[in-house]
Amino acid sequence: MAVMNQNYCNLKESYLFSQIAAKVNAFVEKHREKKVIRMGIGDVTLPLAPSVVAAMQKAVAEMGVKDTFKGYGPEQGYAFLRQALVKYYDNQGIGLAADEIFVSDGAKSDCGNITDLFDNVNTILVPDPVYPVYVDTNIMCGRKIVYVDGLPENNFLPMPDYAINADVIYLCSPNNPTGAAYTKEQLQAWVDYALSKDAVILYDAAYEAFVTDPDIPRSIFCVEGAKTCAIELCSLSKTAGFTGTRCGYTVVPHDLKRKAGNGADMSLNKMWLRRQTTKFNGVPYIIQRGAEAVFSTQGQAECQEMLDYYRENARIMMKTLAQKNIRFFGGVYSPYIWLQCPEGMGSWEFFDYLLEKLAIVGTPGAGFGKRGEGYLRLTAFGSREATIEAMSRIEEKL
Ligand SMILES: *Cc1c(COP(=O)(O)O)cnc(C)c1O
């Protein structure tokens, strides 16, 4: 008899995006004349950079020629891409070996799959509000989850509480949904906490490329001691428009070691290599060639130009919100603006209000955790025209 994983019963129904879609569809049915502006789902809209497209086209041609055809590749990624990533980190003053980098089909898979390395007895620490994948993947293994609160008082950057004994810690900076980003000193405090608890930090850096301020780290490995307590998860999705193309990478340092319950020395790098070579067969060659182009000088310039477009959208949004005296967070190091619902409205209440009155779609903050209630996330991933139109509606009618 197949006994089911009963932990799935403990998952909350994922109402968020389906409920948003249902409400938006009903609104569109009723008001066909109104132009709905979608600032809800965190997906990019600009196409891939020209050098990325060219690299992938070249790779497609290679696949059609006997001498350059590729079958199975290395599960952990081709050397050309891992070397390009070594150089990318080196430019930030972070020294990594190529075999500390594992190429993957995106950060979401790795966020979930990395749970394979840890026993289910671990207590998982998750900031609230945050990307829902951290919570759900751990509920699926029946783990205990504790929360640290993101609040306006701490600028949605919760700091460690030594009274909490956490074993695995998720951090996301710049943050989805709040857009908040930790300083180097704040990350140092988290690393110190993790070291004192012998815990491991899973650092989600999906938005690192949005950071331009040299005082805001783009990698946790610029913090002293991080290589002995942290894994970094990265993605080309938001930084190079790869949401549909699928490529990311995870850094597991050689210095990251822990003891198993039976006293055995465990290298997390070796464990992850074994896990990936067993359960994953690598990212397509064509996609990895496209990813390599992202990290070329030309590719970086093109991608930063793309991010500049989104940054300008965010500036336009922040200007309007400031004028309207609406309190908000984020928008500077991330494509997300996290705003406090005006007049004490709840997340869904304000969502409905924006949709009905202004035909603008946001994401209710309550969907990202208990502490998200009373907030709403807007994204800067739309077109310039739509962003300007949405802000003029807010200016005139809110
Ligand atoms: C979008 C996102 C991801 C997922 O990225 P993929 O590489 O597309 O799977 C991971 N973490 C956060 C915080 C995100 O917002």
Image (tube, helix red, strand yellow):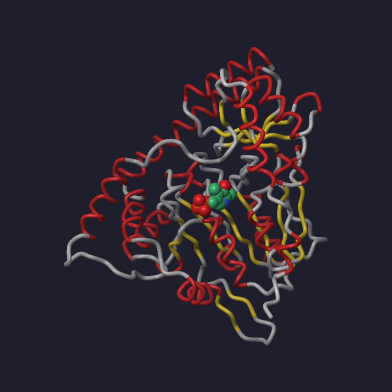
Q: Residue at x 45, y 65 (%)?
A: 102
181, 124: nearer the viewer:
124
The image position of residue 46, as x and y in percent, is: 42, 36
Compared with residue 386, is residue 15 higher up or lower down, i.e. above or below?
below
Q: Residue at x 43, y 43 (%)?
A: 241
Task: Name the quadrant of the N terminus.
Answer: bottom right
278, 129: nearer the viewer:
278
The image position of residue 341, as x and y in percent, is: 74, 29
Answer left or right for 391 relative to 15: left
Residue 205 makes an appearance in the image? no
The image position of residue 332, as x and y in percent, is: 57, 34
Answer left or right for 237 relative to 52: right
For the image, the number of numbered tags is 0
Task: Name the quadrant of the C terminus.
Answer: top right
The answer to which image quadrant residue 53 occupies is top left
Q: Residue at x 51, y 47 (%)?
A: 208
Residue 65 makes an appearance in the image? yes
The image position of residue 228, as x and y in percent, is: 58, 68
Q: Residue at x 65, y 22 (%)?
A: 321
